[in-house]
Amino acid sequence: MKIAIWNVNSIKARLEHVKHWLEENQPDLLMIQELKGLEFPTAEFESIGYQSNAVTQKAYNGVAIFSKQKQELILDHLPHDETDEQARYLEIDYKGTRIINIYLPNGNPVDSDKYTYKLNWMDRLYTHLKELRKANVPFVIGGDFNVIPEDKDCHDPKAWRGDALFRSETHLKWQALLNLGLYDSFRIQNQNAGEYSFWDYQAGAWQKDNGIRIDHFLLSPPLVDKLISCQIDKDPRGKEKASDHTPVILELNL
């Protein structure tokens, strides 16, 4: 099974990019983040053989999952705070495997309630994933985590000190997820520095390869030995009017 994640930074702006990538790569599932709008072009993707579920929000956030075959919607919001209206979470069942798509809050500036929201969101995510682990539900969780796990996941660690993506409090929450027995699938097979999934639009970051790795797949223990590969596809980032993120592709022997 081939599963991909991609923060598309506006589905309206990147519609043709996403359709072309799906047709060229033919994943079983594609999980996208940052839709940035209430309207979602379901029919456009049905025309190329993909059904979808989407959670949208006016101008901000939004997540969707495309699949070649039937998917069963489990949750369209992260549990444990029914007042949270931000569109950041989708959980489905696909052929007996739980698939979770997230757009974790950025959290900047750190001296605002945005960082508090990020940390609380990560606590809620931990609680829900702990419940899935306790219930012995195998799952894949992927998306834009807005977390730089280690120094080798960014081009210049000093430049990111104090940022919400790289603060010690953020790292503690990330480590708590790993302590549930989850595995960063990219790092299972690749320990190299300089492998990124995001390059800012400013200061020639893409051309200089000044990137960060913030788009991740975490696997629950029953799926780890099913891992075939996890790779970053840099090609879409180099295209005209590209998203500032690029796809990450996970392959599992299911």
Image: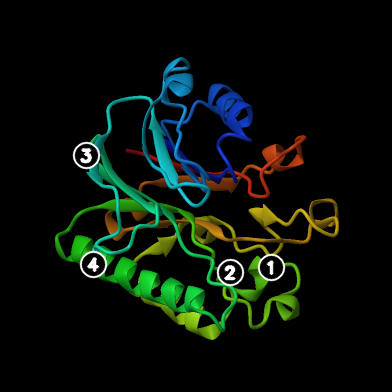
Residue at mark 1 to residue at mark 3: CA–CA distance:
35 Å
Query: Helix, strand, or loop for circle 3?
Result: loop
**Mark 2 neighbour density, 10 Å: few (under 14) some (14–19) many (20 or more):** many
Residue at 43% over, 52% down = 142
Q: Mark 4 points at which residue?
A: 80
Residue type for callout 1:
Cys
Residue 181 visible, this orientation:
no
The residue wearing badge 1 is 154
Q: Position of residue 32 (x, y in %)?
A: 49, 43
Separation (CA) of disc 4 from disc 3: 24 Å
Query: Which element carries disc 1, helix, strand or loop?
Result: loop
Q: Residue at x 49, y 83 (%)?
A: 169
- Does the rendering let one see residue 203? yes
State if disc 2 and disc 3 touch (CB < 8 Å): no
Residue under pointer 2: 148
Label 3: few (<14), some or many (≥20) within 10 Å? few
The amino acid type of the residue labelled 2 equals Ile
**Disc sitting over residue 96 in the figure:** 3
x, y percent for residue 217? 45, 54
